[in-house]
Amino acid sequence: MEKEKRTTKGKLWTKSFTLLVMANLFVFMSFQMLIPTVSPYLKSLGASGVEIGLVTMVFSVGAVIIRPFIGYLLGFCQRRWLILVGAAGLLFVTILYPLTQIIFVLLIFRFLHGFMWGWSSTVNGTAAVDIVPNDRIGEGMGYFGLSITVGMIIAPSIGIFLYQHYSFDTMINISAVFGVIAFLLLSIIKYQTPENVKNVNKKDVHFSFSGSLIESSSWFPAFVTLLATFGYGTIVTFIVIFSEERGIDQIFLFYFLNAITATLIRPITGKWFDRNGPKLLVIVCSALTFISMWILSFSTNWVGIAISGCLFGAGYGSLIPALQAWVLAKTPKARRGVANGMFYSAIDVGIGMSGLVFGMVALFMDTAKLFQISSFFFIAVIAFTLFAGEKTVYQSAGRMNRDVDI
């Protein structure tokens, strides 16, 4: 029986899963175009380094505040309306940006954007977990994570290109188009709400902010995610400013080659995760990301940017999906909504705190040094993962799946 269970796998690429991956890609494309461009846009309006860091920070605060409530709703609500409201909210906030050039008002918009982002990313990720067969969680969430990774990587290059060659308003319009496509795709998907969620009595589901914010069974990979995204935060916040300092017009190559490499390597790393677990995969990916950030810091032309982008795609582009699969594999099914929210909150807090902290540090040193300093957080990821106990890091997919089912 055990042998048959291991060899007979559930179907992964159903119509619903395929559409959800595509829709999530457009959600991230729409959102991620703003990530590297809001900072230089505010700088052009006269914002200080601290104010630029605050733009990232208030966004993260909004995302973290909403996620526990969404995790609570996912415990007893049907998926469809949660997903569509989240997508519509993201689209609405996106079109608000060109309405003002007042930095304080833009900070409010950014908070609202984080609020809706926390909503949408949590419910979309949970919907994917509902659809993916449990015995293919690493592979399935790897492909779903690829839509996140590609969106996080290729969309900023589009945003940078539009911002540098056209205008901020043009970029917002294109972002809104992607948001409309995402909403339309999400509206035609047949979602699978777990039976234990359908049958639960709402009165039996008690809300606790901390209980809906943190899932104790998977706290460790979420903590590792926090460290990794704190290191990544300087890229998000300062890479366009870095290109302006160095006079590099081809900075979009970093994101473009990043996306290509991440896409090519993702099927390999997803299957590796299911066979061997996360430990070695996280260590190797973190090492590649560390090397990439140092190459980037020394780059003065497109060659260094291209090399750094490829290594970053192989490293960070595989690291985040692996960490998400690790979080979900360690979580009981009934708590995966909370765990998924915790994972995305770790990303937002890491990036947000990084933007604020290094925004202040940027007052005293150039951007290249920020990349070098923040890269050591990936060494911390390696250290924590390397010395984690057996109960914290599962070594095989089989053990992961059995533990999840208990």
Image (tube, helix red, strand yellow):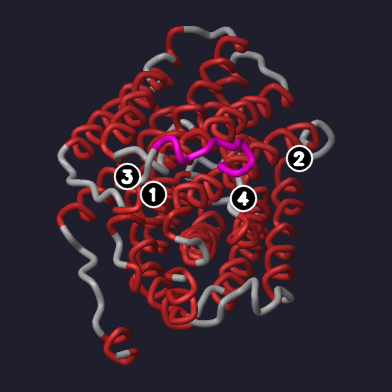
| Residue behind mark 4 | 229
Dot 2 amino acid type: Asp
Depth-wise, is mark 1 or mark 3 nearer the camera?
A: 1
Q: Going by the picture, which residue comes out furthest to the right?
A: 364
Earlier in the chain: of badge 2 and badge 1, it is 1
Q: Nearer the viewer, residue 322 or 252?
A: 322
How packed is label 3: few (under 14 Cα within 10 Å), some, or many (20 or more)? Answer: many
| Disc 4, SS | helix
Mark 4: which amino acid?
Answer: Thr
Residue type marked 3 = Asn
> Mark 1 highlights which residue?
126
Residue 298 visible: yes
Seen from the viewer's position, the closer of residues 89 and 99 is: 89
Looking at the image, which residue is at 47% across and 40% down? 205
Residue on which the image places disc 3: 24
Q: What numbered label is drawn on residue 366?
A: 2
- The earlier-in-sequence mark between 2 and 3 is 3
